[in-house]
Image: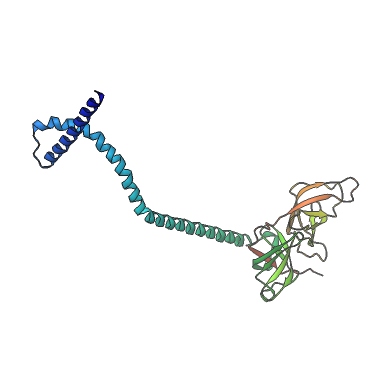
Amino acid sequence: MARSRRSRRTLTVIVLVVLSLSLISLDLNGRTHSLTSGVKSVANDVYAPLRQGVLDIINPIGDFFAGAFNYGSVQAQNEQLQKTIGDLRAAQAERGFEQSQLRQLMALENLPFLQSLPTVTAQTIDEYSSNFTATITLDKGRADGVDVGYPVVGAGGLVGQVIQSFHHSSVVRLVTDGQSKVGVTFGNQLTGIVDGQGPSSSMTADLVPPHTVLHKGEVMFTSSLDAAAFPAGIPVASVRSFHTPAGASQESIEVDPKADLGQLAYVDVVQWVPQP
């Protein structure tokens, strides 16, 4: 009995599908009339879910093949886009580097602490540092007016001193170098010596009596003592911390260089020698 009902339903669906196809064919041939319109509506109601099911299967397959055919083009466009982005980033970085160099060059103009001392502007072409050594190499040497012993300054203050000079290059010992010693004055005509301890350690100010009145951030300048290695008045370092150890013969002082030693693309070599 159940089998007979299923057979009748199947037959009914088949008849309706065939009828809908026939009506569609008639419609395409322009022979539709009002008698068929109601039947066609019923047939469409039956056929619509079947048609949608077929489209649900066919459309993803079509999209897949379309995507497969277009994949190479999309990949090529993506690669070109990534290259363009990379080129723009490189150009931006280069402009940033050039602007930084320009700022450093402009900062060397009319340094107030040099007054009218003659200078040679030089570019850093190499740098070297270890636990105790800190030097840079400049693109100017004896032929350019740079000699051994000349002070080297940056926008903030003293950078170091020329220790070797060749025809068109020279080597500068930075103030942080373990062998650097700079006589300084600060406060009310107090004096001391700023010593480099190597690039990885803080500089110190030595030979300052214990319990000397100091202030954090206080600036120490090159002194004007006889036979001083540097012209007077160049900022050397600022006080970071200080204290008097028990029983010590001098104040324990840590200082920071006034020149930005991380920005040394360009420096000024001061054509100055100690006065006898």
Q: State the image quarter where residue 108 is shown.
A: bottom right
Q: In the image, residue 229 lies at what x, y percent?
A: 79, 65
Quadrant (top left, top right, bottom left, bottom right) of the N terminus: top left
Which residue is more in the foreground, 95 or 257? 95
- The relative height of residue 239 versus residue 223 in the rendered view (above or below) is above
Position of 76 with respect to 194 (left or right) is: left
Q: Residue furthest right?
A: 247
Q: State the image quarter where residue 191 is shown.
A: bottom right
Position of 211 with respect to 72 (left or right) is: right
Q: In the image, residue 8 lies at what x, y percent?
A: 20, 28
In the image, what residue occupies the spot 14% across and 37% down? 23
- The relative height of residue 47 versus residue 216 in the rendered view (above or below) is above
In the image, what residue occupies the spot 66% across and 74% down? 168
Which residue is more in the foreground, 232 or 184? 184
Instruction: Give the colouring mode of the picture.
Output: rainbow
Q: State the image quarter where residue 185 is shown.
A: bottom right
- The relative height of residue 86 versus residue 38 in the rendered view (above or below) is below
Q: How many marks?
A: 0
In the image, what residue occupies the spot 31% across and 41% down? 57
Which residue is more in the foreground, 1 or 47? 1
Which residue is more in the foreground, 221 or 189? 221
Quadrant (top left, top right, bottom left, bottom right) of the C terminus: bottom right
Q: In the image, residue 133 lies at what x, y percent?
A: 75, 62
Q: In the image, residue 127 lies at what x, y percent?
A: 68, 64
In the image, what residue occupies the spot 33% across and 44% down? 60
